[in-house]
Amino acid sequence: MTRPASDILLDILRDEGITHVFGNPGSTEMPLMDALVDAPDIHYVLGLQEATAVGMADGWALTSGKTGFVNLHAMGGLGNAMGVLVASKASETPLVVTAGQQDTRHLATEPWLSGDLVALAAPVTKWAKEVHRGEDLGAALRRAFAIARTPPCGPVFLSLPMDVLDQPVEGSTPPASAPPRLGPSPDSDGFADMLARHDPEKVFVLLGDDLPAGAAPGLVAFAEAGGYAVAGMQLTSRSAFPSAHPCWAGVLKPDFAAIRERLERVEALVLVGGRAFVAYPYRDVRPIPDGVKILHVADNPDAFGREHPAHMALLGDIGATLQSAAARLGGLLDRNSVVARLAQRDATKQAQIAKVRAEILSTAHETPLSPDAAVLTVSDALPADTLLANDSAATFGQVQDLLMTRPGRYFFARGGVLGCNMPAAVGAALLHDGPVASLVGDGGAMYSPQALWSAARYRAKVLFIVFNNRRYGVLQNIAKQLGCKNAVAGRFVGMDVDDPAIDFMALSKSMGVPSVQADAPDAIRAAIAEALTRDGPSLIEIAVK
């Protein structure tokens, strides 16, 4: 049977669980647009700029646990998307990114809209290729999906010349290869035996930023088996441990000196996943004190030794490995002692929460609000089923340890690239059964405000919370910490966004999103309550110090 290569593409998208294609089309993408006319089960989600399209696909992928699919327009469109692709690679989000290329029959003449797309994409993707024949499309696409979802996950790229999708192809759609299935590490018993020789109060579990939500049950079981303290990093792309759990010890600031101080009494450090040590700015300090035994659990060999050498490295499914170790620990540790330790952790945690809440709320009468008071008020007003998409530095203060982060319901723009969070929230809202809150600063909100339009068009239930201090506050804080000349002089060059002030009410209205300014706790609570009644997006602007 002969059919166009575009039919093969649609078959594979359906088989890979793709329900939404994100993009911004141009003339080189017309064959795909034509193919989607007869595919009502695959929804095309339009972004008004390519970075917005990639950001929405990123949020969709992280929420669904599947590989997202994006279609961009030629060399320029791929260029527009590069910043968010940097973030997606850093967050290890599985994405298949495609872009239309000019017709292969005149590429040699370098026609308008042509270019070396593969060379442009290669630095920010795991794998990048151009398909030259329709009969190669199926195999290339299957390979792209497989590479994207293989740990360490990440974006891959395919250049699709516009004539390739129209070429006739014979034969059936190539099947996907069976995915490799990791079980628990065969060393899990030895791992548990080694840990059992240490005082549980001197065992510390540190989570990397690449852990899937599916690892959460194993992480919780392991923590509860020993009553171990578990912490994450402030700059983490997702959450894999519930912050309400007694074992959750909060996040470590991206400062090697602060991390080292936290680990001074630790004998055994259990690293889970990859990239657990993130620091900025530079400090001439080793984050792990001498003598600490490092036990590393990961699901891909690239993670081991990347940051620090491990005394023991366990390769396997992370959740299954920790479940197995937890079962072993259950027979090695005194259960009454573990139960008492968990109860003590819970009591200490609740006392600390009450103390921090009281300190923050003592300033809630001030105008403008402190970032901590504003974020805490928002957090308290959101329902339990809210998914948080965050890239706001307003959340970096005391309030961070009060945020309710849950596996699969918290994402952060780990790559340090602004403009990811708002579109990611829209992509997440297309799947999430509940509201999505996008926590963003006024500076970050201007990198991809087109997300507001997409949210309105697709009636995505997103609450865009803009914390507005009319400046790049995080830059000014870093300048102060480093004693930079502009901070000493009190003249921050290029760090103020106040003249003219951005009118978020007008901007939001122009994109079809209802908006309100709410600068006091009662007003914030009322604005959130009203937004939650809407079948679609809202924007709430909050002035902060």
Image: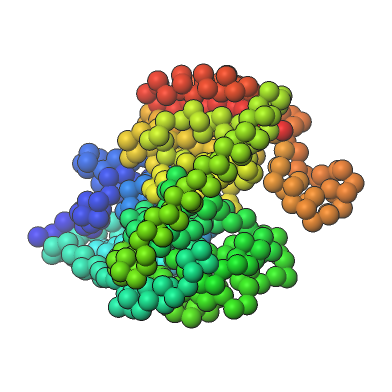
Q: Residue at x 20, y 60 (%)?
A: 168
- Residue 474 screen position, x and y as percent: 69, 46
Classify residue 471 as left or right of residue 319: right
Q: Position of residue 212 (x, y in %)?
A: 38, 57
Q: Which quarter of the figure is the N terminus placed in?
A: bottom left
From the viewer's perspective, is 540 left or right of 41?
Answer: right
Q: Is residue 538 above or below residue 210?
A: above
Which residue is located at x 37 percent, y 23 percent?
535
Q: Decide: is 147 above or below 365.
A: below
Look at 37% across and 73% down and name the residue there: 192
Q: Where residue 321 sits: x, y (%)? A: 33, 68
Residue 192 versus residue 343: which sits nearer the camera? 343
Q: In the drawing, does residue 27 fall left or right of residue 491? A: left
The spot of residue 522 in percent (x, y) is 57, 19
Q: Is residue 357 visible?
A: yes
Residue 442, quarter of the rendered image: top right
* Left or right placement of residue 451 versus residue 384 in this view: right
Q: Residue furthest right?
A: 489
